[in-house]
Amino acid sequence: MEKTIISIEETTALLKLLSDKTRLTMLKLLESDECCVCEFVELFQMSQPAISQHLKKLRSASVVNETRRGQWVFYSLNDQHPMYPLIQSILSEVESQDDKVQHLIESGTRVTCCVDPK
Amino acid sequence: MEKTIISIEETTALLKLLSDKTRLTMLKLLESDECCVCEFVELFQMSQPAISQHLKKLRSASVVNETRRGQWVFYSLNDQHPMYPLIQSILSEVESQDDKVQHLIESGTRVTCCVDPK
DNA sequence: CTTTGATATAAGTAATTGATTATATAAGTA
DNA sequence: TACTTATATAATCAATTACTTATATCAAAG
């Protein structure tokens, strides 16, 4: 398995994307499980459009995948991204965000959003 | 050897620092050898104060070490930085900057600056 | 001690970024 | 169909960023 050579420009673009607290936290959360937009809205003290714009940046860079299920849109890490190994090694250094997941469970947000749509 | 846990804030601050083309290229160059300021000035199409300001940011974050030798100031990677492993894994993904080193040698800049000061 | 070369700092500025509010779209439900 | 909930887009704005030019500092050489 050859190592893909990544240009300085591609790398700085990715790092810039990850150098925002909200976006990096989002990705750390996605590392363990997909999330829907409303969960991010619950977690971050920020307006829904702000969340949506952060997700758009991640989406435009193909760092995340988007799946609509009914009225909800779920996001997940794109493990096919050419820089996925780098993303993984960055995320592995970052402190766990389990407290946020716990908050979702306790507040009932996770249940509301993520129930099986069948 | 325990893995140091790094906060989201510390990580985003580091990524922001590395998410600039000039600074990331500087660090990639420092990965193989120390450089003096005049070498960076030769390499980047940019004013000397601009170079100096980039170096100040890297210095303030302790990502690089500074050593004065006579009238020259040399910079090197700080391998004692708490996030040095992350810095290394980022740099390892980035394309080589050997062409820039070659340019320094050919232009004579490297010789002028980096001769043993004894 | 004055000049020169190397580097740092200060002040100003245009471009970018990350938020906001208002509005649009899209899906589910009465 | 109309209403509600979830999400996206548009327009706007304040803060930050990465340059620029001008000036200061600092070390070596005359």
Image: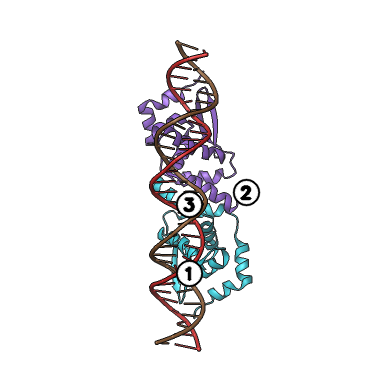
Chain colours: A cyan, B purple, C red, D brown
Write down the residue under mark 1: A74
Q: Which mark is residue B4?
A: 2
In the figure, residue A103 lies in which quadrant? bottom right
- Chain at numbered mark 2: B
Q: Residue at x 58, y 49 (%)?
A: B10
Q: Residues within 10 Å of mark 2 (few under 14, many from 20)?
A: few
> Is the C-beta separation of discs 3 and 2 under 8 Å?
no
Residue B21 place in picture, x, y as percent: 42, 44
| Residue A6 visible in the displayed image | no
Q: Secondary structure at mark 2?
A: loop
Q: Is residue D12 above or below residue B79?
A: below
Task: Name which residue lies at 62% across and 49% down.
Answer: B4
Front one among C12 and B33: C12
* Front-most of residues B36 and D8: D8
Q: At label 3, which amino acid type do we have? A: Leu
Q: Residues within 10 Å of mark 3 (few under 14, many from 20)?
A: some
**Mark 1, chain letter?**
A
Report the residue marked by disc 3.
Answer: A86
Which disc number belongs to residue A104? Answer: none
Q: Residue at x 38, y 25 (%)?
A: B108
What amino acid does circle 2 point to?
Thr
Q: Amino acid at mark 1?
A: Phe
A86 w.r.t. B56: above or below: below
Alpha carbon of mark 3 to alpha carbon of mark 2: how far?
Answer: 18 Å
Position in image of residue A53 (x %, y %):
45, 62
Q: Is residue B62 left or right of residue C5?
A: right
- Cα–Cα span, label 3 and label 1: 23 Å
